[in-house]
Image (tube, rainbow, N blue to C red):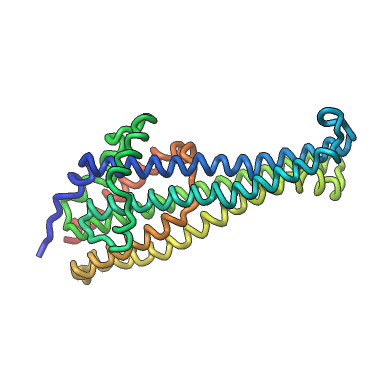
Amino acid sequence: MIEQNKNIAVLQNEITSLEKLSAQNYLYSSAKKFKALQIILSVVVIVIISFLKIIFEKKNSEVLLGMNWNMVSPYFSLLSVLVTIVNVYILKSIISQKIKLASLIQYDFDTYVMNINKNIIYQENCPPYEDIWKYSLKNKKKGYPPDFFKDWYSPYVDSLDKSVSNFICLKTNLVWDMNLRTIYRNSILILLILLSVLLLIPSFILGVTIKSFTLEVLIPLMPLFTFSISEIMDNNKTILNKKRIKTIIDLTWDRILSKTIFIDELSKLSKECLEYLIILRRENPIIFDWFFNLTKKSSNDEMNYSADRLIKEYKNRS
């Protein structure tokens, strides 16, 4: 028996659904701002302090009010400690809380438009609608009204069985996120390699010793390298985790096309995949809006093409 789905295209564009998308977008964007502050404090400030130390130690200059570097260095050390405390105990907590709320709101949206029963634990932790409306209103003031998020999923999935259309939505969203993170990870890796080359070649030409290069260039820039490598590793871990669930989804899609899976089993798998995705979303490293906006059009075009291809593939096998 064919279970027709006439809901996703309509439900996802209801005002309450759009406000959920707007709210989660606001929370993610807010978390990204705190992440930017985290980078400024833990990378930029530390790099500047490191270079200042080298410059003033070399020149033996006065720094401020007749004080030399040895007099002011304890204050910079204290600043470094304060930066670490703010980063670990305040900023990380704020970022984590905002990402948690955003992922729960996204889960609330997905379960509603796909008509999937919520996990009782996540349901109890979902923020009340009053809070969702409040975040959505803040996003509207930033220039992102709820209508901005229309047609989150391809509206053409409505022409398919409900369980199949849900699965296509999950599959295309997963692939979209993986592709975005792959581009982001590779971009950081390329920039890191370019920076290393730009530092090494002039140093080699100028005859800088390994000791001088290490003390005066490498060590001051260590926070930047550490951050970049951490971003690469964190995104790579996320991509690998999502590849595992993608493997399950791909195998299930093959069963859908070969008609060797029952609707009840497919519905159960969709629910389990959605619950696993919320766990991954909580752990996902943040990708800044400016990078997302650079790749938005190509990524969205690719996601829509993927959805259309899957719809045609399913219809051709039906």
Tell how many labels. 0
- Measuring from the top left, give residue 17's x and y in whole percent: 25, 44
Residue farthest to the right, as pictured: 60
Of 6 and 123, nearer the camera is: 123
From this viewpoint, is residue 237 visible?
yes
| 269 on left or right of 316 | right
Quarter-of-image position of residue 2: bottom left
- Measuring from the top left, give residue 174's x and y in whole percent: 37, 55
| 239 on left or right of 228 | left
Q: Residue at x 45, y 40 (%)?
A: 30
Image quarter (top left, top right, bottom left or bottom right) of the N terminus = bottom left
Q: Residue at x 80, y 49 (%)?
A: 214
| 60 on left or right of 83 | right
Residue farthest to the left, as pictured: 1
From this viewpoint, is residue 253 visible?
no
Of 18 and 174, nearer the camera is: 18
- Measuring from the top left, give residue 286's x and y in whole percent: 49, 48
Quarter-of-image position of residue 18: top left
- In this rendering, is residue 244 above or below 199? below
Q: Residue at x 28, y 50 (%)?
A: 109
Quarter-of-image position of residue 191: top right
Of 78 and 243, nearer the camera is: 78
Image quarter (top left, top right, bottom left or bottom right) of the C terminus = bottom left
- Measuring from the top left, give residue 251's x and y in whole percent: 32, 67
Q: Residue at x 87, y 47 (%)?
A: 209
